[in-house]
Image: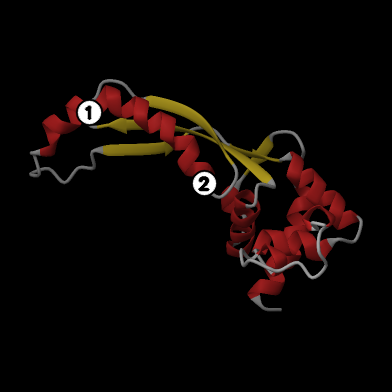
Amino acid sequence: MNANDAIETLVGQLLRSVPETWADLDPPTLSALQEQTLFLLTASGMIERRVTFRLRMAAQPDAVEATISITGEGGLAQAMQFLIKETWNDWREGFENQRGDDSDDTPRFHCERVGSEQWRLTPEGVMARSDLDNGNTATVIDFVLKKGSYDGKPRMLLVPHPFLIFG
């Protein structure tokens, strides 16, 4: 079985095993292919992940602890956008004061995970699981892997849509 076939199989397995309510996820127990599939399912909006972490900047007395939820292709960037903006407002002066001191190789920022990561199906994930259970596996796989009609290429309608007929 090649990697693509394995990922297609894992899409179904994960959609059938991820709970609909928040539950703990242990990422180190996942294989590389499972991680890749989880990434694809999260990017496709079928799984939502929740992570808590603590961020520190050298010479700053306060740390920032945040819990973010991630789903969709830009999920991580969207979740971090507000946090980074607010943190930067608090830490800008300290960062600029340290910027000229390149004599120390110590990292200026440190990020650590707090607690366990969690996951759950989104409403779209619940619908995708239902589609799998009703035999519509190809539609779900195509959407997650951006294949077929979901590959972003424009297509012409073979049959005119009734709302597009003028007369």
Q: Measure the C-alpha gap from mark 1 to mark 2.
A: 25 Å
| Residue that lies at the very extreme toward the front in this rendered image | 167
Q: Position of residue 81 (x, y in %)?
A: 42, 35
Residue 73: percent from left, percent from top: 55, 50
Q: Secondary structure at mark 2?
A: loop
Between 99 and 45, the residue placed more toward the observer is 45
**Looking at the image, which residue is at 82% across and 62% down?**
137
Residue 23's place in the image compared with 17, above or below, is above
Task: Name the mark nearer the viewer: 1 or 2.
Answer: 2
Disc nearer the start of the sequence (1/2):
2
- Tell me: residue 72, above or below residue 59: below
Q: Which mark is residue 112?
A: none
Q: Quadrant of the N terminus?
A: bottom right
* Residue, disc 2: 74
Residue 49, visible in the rendered structure? yes
**Disc 2 residue type (three-letter):** Gly
**Contact between labelled residues 2 and 1, with CB atoms less than 8 Å apart:** no
Q: Is residue 89 left or right of residue 154?
A: left
Q: Which residue is mark 1?
A: 92
Q: Quadrant of residue 25?
A: top right
Q: In this view of the protein, which residue sits in the foreground, 138 or 24?
A: 138
User: What x and y, as percent, mark residue 151?
Assistant: 64, 66
Query: Seen in the image, is 85 located left or right of residue 20?
Result: left
In the visual, does 78 lie left or right of 3? left
Hey, what amino acid is under mark 1? Arg
- Quadrant including the C terminus: bottom right
Q: Is residue 10 visible?
A: no
